[in-house]
Image (spheres, rainbow, N blue to C red):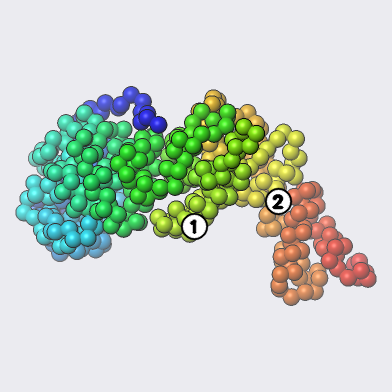
Amino acid sequence: MKLKLGKKQKSRLNRANLKKVPAEVRDVVATLRAAGKQAYLVGGCVRDLLAGLDAVDFDVATDAVPEEVQRLFRRTAPTGIKHGTVTVLGARGDYEVTTFRRDGKYGDARHPDDVTYAESIEEDLSRRDFTFNALAYDLAGDKLVDLFGGVEDFERGVVRAVGDPKERFREDGLRPLRAVRLAARFEFDVDGETLNAIPEVLDRVRMVAVERVRDEFMKMLATAAKPSYGLELMRDTGLLELFIPEVLEGYAVTQNEFHAYDVYTHSLYSCDAAPAEKPLVRLAALLHDVGKPRTRVVRDGRVTFYNHQAVSRRMARHILNRLRFSKKERDYVLHLIYYHMFGYTPSWTDAAVRRLIRKVGRENIADLFDLRIADWFGNGTNYGFPGYLRVLERRINDAIAREEAFTEKDLAVDGRDVMAELGIPPGPKVGEVLSYLLERVLEDQSLNERERLLGLVRERFGPPDVPSE
Ligand code: ATP
Ligand code: MG
């Protein structure tokens, strides 16, 4: 697969945007200045402001030490005192105020061994990762501090390390992933020297806490229009092999005539086609066919991947455990992967539609559809929204709008009713009865009335000689 990007965004930075700093952020800076301290906006927020993007978090760098910052503001939280960070809690947001830093030695490739305070913003900027992240803005003097050509790099569309890339990557093995993540987010190139340094520092990348890697990776899925571009950078540099080698197994593994791409490429394009606002669905899209290479069989000249959804789910479980996803996130992604193959034909009865809703879970249907559609667009032979899915989607939405019953909770009776009706104590029997009732109701919704259900309970589970009341 060749890196495929549309026309690269040419991003002119606009100094005038710096005037758009929210009033509360100005107040934070003003308070520090009034106390005779230096104070600058720094990092990602300056970059995003200049680019006319919504800056999410505003970070302030100052020569005030944390104790002073805590004294100057009414409400603060000691979020990272040992790194010099105090969070100022405002009415409209929280702001990280960090004392100018100069990082110490990097023994474990994770955190500086010790942080010492620096005297100047210049020193503070020198420890930052990429040139366009090493920008500071002095609000009072309306002065932009750009020591490393960050503005020019941003406008040319280049991710470039501050200083010697190999050294900077060895200091903190997370930076290569940040480089890829930012390149994917802005659709930038990674500068040659910076890119070439990555394969040489993989031993340091490996030492980074996997949670930090996972967070950068998920941030990439959430912010890039085309994660495939970042994933290809990861493949080229060895980062993918390091963290999700299973995805590489699909490389050059060909499929049947419904697919224009090999399994790997299809996975990347499916990931692109899933909504960025749902990074976990994107993750599911990336992994939904990960088991295909291991199930590939050619039978009578036809390529098959029998039961690949189960193998994909098993492999994805390993991957997600390795990357320390929470149990909830992991199970959610696995659920989507497993059900992505659901079949549908127009001959399905309403009961069959309800069974699908029950199996997948009402609350997961929308995401499962997003995955299925991403899968559809990701195979390179389809155009336009698949009509049969449109029909199924309408049938599902109608059933949900009619407030039909899909789970035991939706039944007109509950466990207590069952126990009272049969005179039995709590236990597995109660669940068995409810599950029987649900089966009947899935088939025929008109049964979902209290008296009719209790009648069914008596008829099926009651003693034969119980007289009806
Ligand atoms: P985003 O907009 O996605 O938050 P960001 O660049 O703001 O991107 P953050 O993780 O919020 O990323 O970091 C804020 C700033 O801190 C960065 O712009 C950069 O200047 C600096 N920084 C963050 N992580 C590192 C790192 N690992 N090494 C050096 N500097 C870093
Ligand atoms: Mg940020």
| Residues packed near mark 2 inside 10 Å, few (<14), some (14 to 19) or many (20 plus) | many
| Residues packed near mark 1 inside 10 Å, few (<14), some (14 to 19) or many (20 plus) | few
SS state under label 1: helix
- Relative vertical location of residue 155 with respect to residue 271 in this rendering, above or below: above
Q: Which residue matches tag 2?
A: 405
Residue 337 in the image: x percent, y percent? 54, 47
Q: Nearer the viewer, residue 293 or 325?
A: 293
Residue 70 visible in the shown view = no
Is 393 positioned to the left or the right of 437 in the image? left
Residue 129 visible in the shown view = yes
Is 207 positioned to the left or the right of 366 in the image? left
Which quarter of the figure has residue 56? top left
Q: Amino acid at mark 2?
A: Ala
| Residue at image point 75% right, 45% down | 351
Residue 102 in the image: x percent, y percent? 11, 55
Q: Which residue matches tag 1?
A: 328
- Relative vertical location of residue 286 with respect to residue 117 in this rendering, above or below: above
